Image (spheres, rainbow, N blue to C red):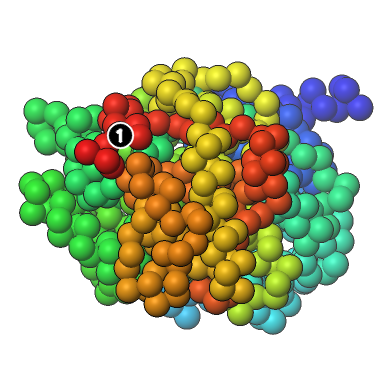
């Protein structure tokens, strides 16, 4: 009904202006709030900073005004709940949260408000929501028709394919069953096709309308560089692109492990940067203190594991650096998305190397997950590797991963500085033949280091012990440095000509893509990084 729709939208705009003080809805917000206000289910995919909160806050207020009761917002993030409730209260909206940070007294006070019908929005941690006590309370409200909607924030947490699976989220499947007829709106800033399908299935959103905003963050410049001396490269990156007369920009540096976080934070401090560590192994008070300082002070660099960042709303983070490769593109996108939320230019910089790929593979292989699950994780890792090895526009690839087609962006390393490509088919054949011969001679594969030694004609103890110096491929790659061979190997992994297996241990094997190259049917174009370009094939000989 068009007339009713217009009337609903009018009520929403009214709330937007009078309560939040904003002039107009952005992008798909108008459609979303109208749809949800009228009782429809929705799946909202919107990048970080896109304005997801208003998508449920406005309908919650409009529906409360219409006597439909309280909106329940499921959120995994205590800090975020706290901030949002604070902001809403300030704007004169009656909101509260229930989570583990509350005293029994406070919790009881909020439950009383809830029963009295005094609340417009209630934020609840998922594990809290699922307690019998909370369920009973909501059921009684539901019977009286006083549950206006459920909003499920960070909905990708429901999916084990997502990068932030939370088992409690899985239990949210009870919502559509227990609270029939209460509209549900699920929101996330990151979901590839698989995760999206999982959200729909878990939360029974088959009939929901899906709203997808563009995932493009045009102000973020993507740069993915080959890892050599990662910490030196990081320092150079910050000095070159983020230093100013006052010091340096605020940024986040992500590392894989707690130990690495500590090391890098210390290294940056010693080099004169204002840097702090953040990981789950630190004392809660220390963590809180570092987080507060990061939000409050100017130009602080947070060196962190992925434990840091979700729900932290700092608009002027000027760079996000990855010293280790994330697990998949969703994680990468989510983490880099924390840069430049104010819309000003920002950098997403990553250093990656073969060891990253090997480590990530090993974590997958060693996990107790079932095989088909591991297969999915490997596929996701490969997609990120392909992004890292790409010689065309990073953004085009990134957006395509989320189902969006676009044109070369002019604001990524490959667009700004197109890598020189050369025909590496011959070296690729050498490398593939070497892997093949070794496998044939030994009955099993070997790791990258050993293969390179054979290729480059290094008669190590291990080479001699296995008689590999007698292979026809011994020394056929002596004209290339190990670095060059590793770069080629990464690209062969990325195009699925080589795979790294866990048995016996990180061994190299030929994969489907190898055949065409060996038969001379496929061409391999290798990227040359500018600083390495002149050396090509002569340097190793010199
Ligand atoms: P997300 O949760 O998608 O990351 P938020 O809901 O935190 O994004 O919104 C990001 C910022 O944009 C907030 O500061 C919010 O107040 C602002 N914002 C959202 N929608 C609008 C709008 N229609 N007009 C003006 N500012 C908006
Ligand atoms: Zn580009």
Q: Which residue, as the protein is rendered here, is positioned at the far right?
A: 1
Looking at this view, is 498 or 4 the one in front? 498
**Quick check: 331 above or below 411?**
below
Image coordinates for residue 344, horizontal then vertical, percent: 37, 25
- For residue 44, say whether it is visible: no
Q: Quadrant of residue 239?
A: top left
Q: Residue at x 70, y 72 (%)?
A: 371
Label 1 CB-ligand 2 distance < 8 A: no
Image coordinates for residue 155, horizontal then vertical, percent: 65, 55
Q: Is residue 47 left or right of residue 403?
A: left
Image coordinates for residue 204, horizontal then vertical, percent: 83, 57
Q: Which residue is mark 1?
A: 538
Image coordinates for residue 186, horizontal then vertical, percent: 69, 50
Looking at this view, is 458 or 332 the one in front? 458
Q: Is residue 429 left or right of residue 240?
A: right
Image quadrant holding the N terminus, namely: top right
Image quadrant holding the C terminus, namely: top left
**Quick check: 361 above or below 409?**
below
Q: Residue at x 50, y 34 (%)?
A: 424
- For residue 275, say whether it is visible: yes
> Secondary structure beneath disc 1?
loop
Q: Is residue 402 left or right of residue 342?
A: right
Q: Residue at x 14, y 29 (%)?
A: 244
Q: Residue at x 61, y 32 (%)?
A: 523
Looking at this view, is 452 or 2 the one in front? 452
* Label 1: how many Cα within 10 Å (few below 14, some 14–19, many 20+): few
Count the labels in the image: 1
């Amino acid at each position: 009904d068009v007339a009713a729709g217009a009337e609903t939208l009018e009520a929403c705009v009214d709330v937007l202006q009078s309560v939040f003080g904003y002039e107009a809805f952005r992008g798909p917000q108008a459609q979303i709030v109208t749809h949800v206000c009228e009782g429809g289910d929705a799946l909202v995919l919107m990048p970080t900073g896109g304005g997801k909160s208003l998508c449920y806050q406005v309908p919650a207020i409009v529906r409360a005004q219409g006597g439909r009761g309280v909106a329940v917002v499921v959120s995994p993030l205590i800090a975020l709940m706290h901030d949002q409730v604070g902001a809403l209260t300030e704007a004169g909206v009656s909101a509260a949260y229930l989570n583990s940070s509350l005293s029994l007294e406070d919790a009881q006070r909020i439950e009383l408000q809830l029963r009295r019908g005094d609340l417009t929005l209630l934020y609840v941690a998922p594990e809290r929501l699922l307690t019998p006590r909370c369920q009973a309370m909501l059921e009684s409200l539901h019977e009286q028709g006083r549950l206006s909607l459920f909003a499920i924030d960070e909905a990708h947490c429901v999916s084990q394919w997502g990068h932030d699976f939370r088992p409690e989220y899985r239990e949210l499947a009870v919502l559509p069953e227990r609270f029939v007829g209460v509209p549900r709106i699920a929101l996330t800033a990151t979901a590839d096709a698989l995760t999206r399908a999982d959200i729909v299935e878990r939360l029974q959103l088959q009939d929901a309308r899906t709203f997808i905003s563009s995932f493009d963050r045009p102000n973020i410049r993507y740069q993915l560089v080959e890892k050599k001396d990662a910490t030196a490269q990081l320092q150079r990156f910050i000095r070159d692109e983020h230093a100013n007369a006052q010091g340096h920009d605020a940024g986040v540096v992500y590392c894989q492990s707690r130990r690495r976080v500590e090391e890098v934070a210390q290294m940056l401090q010693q080099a004169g940067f204002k840097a702090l560590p953040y990981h789950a192994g630190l004392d809660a008070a220390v963590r809180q203190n570092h987080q507060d300082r990061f939000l409050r002070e100017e130009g602080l660099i947070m060196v962190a594991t992925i434990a840091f960042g979700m729900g932290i709303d700092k608009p002027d983070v000027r760079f996000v650096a990855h010293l280790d490769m994330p697990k998949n593109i969703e994680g990468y996108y989510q983490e880099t998305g924390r840069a430049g939320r104010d819309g000003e230019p920002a950098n997403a910089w990553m250093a990656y190397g073969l060891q990253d790929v090997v480590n990530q593979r090993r974590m997958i292989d060693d996990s107790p997950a079932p095989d088909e699950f591991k297969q999915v994780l490997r596929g996701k890792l490969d997609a990120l590797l392909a992004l890292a090895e790409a010689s065309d526009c990073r953004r085009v690839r990134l957006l395509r991963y989320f189902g969006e087609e676009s044109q070369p962006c002019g604001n990524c390393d490959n667009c700004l500085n197109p890598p020189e490509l050369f025909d590496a088919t011959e070296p690729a054949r050498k490398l593939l033949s070497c892997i093949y011969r070794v496998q044939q001679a030994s009955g099993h594969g070997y790791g990258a280091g050993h293969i390179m030694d054979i290729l480059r004609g290094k008669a190590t103890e291990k080479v001699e012990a296995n008689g590999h110096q007698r292979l026809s491929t011994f020394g056929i790659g002596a004209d290339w440095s190990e670095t060059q061979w590793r770069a080629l190997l990464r690209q062969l992994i990325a195009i699925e000509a080589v795979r790294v297996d866990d048995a016996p241990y990180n061994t190299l094997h030929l994969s489907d893509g190898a055949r065409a190259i060996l038969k001379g049917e496929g061409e391999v174009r290798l990227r040359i990084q500018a600083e390495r370009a002149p050396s090509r094939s002569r340097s190793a000989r010199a």
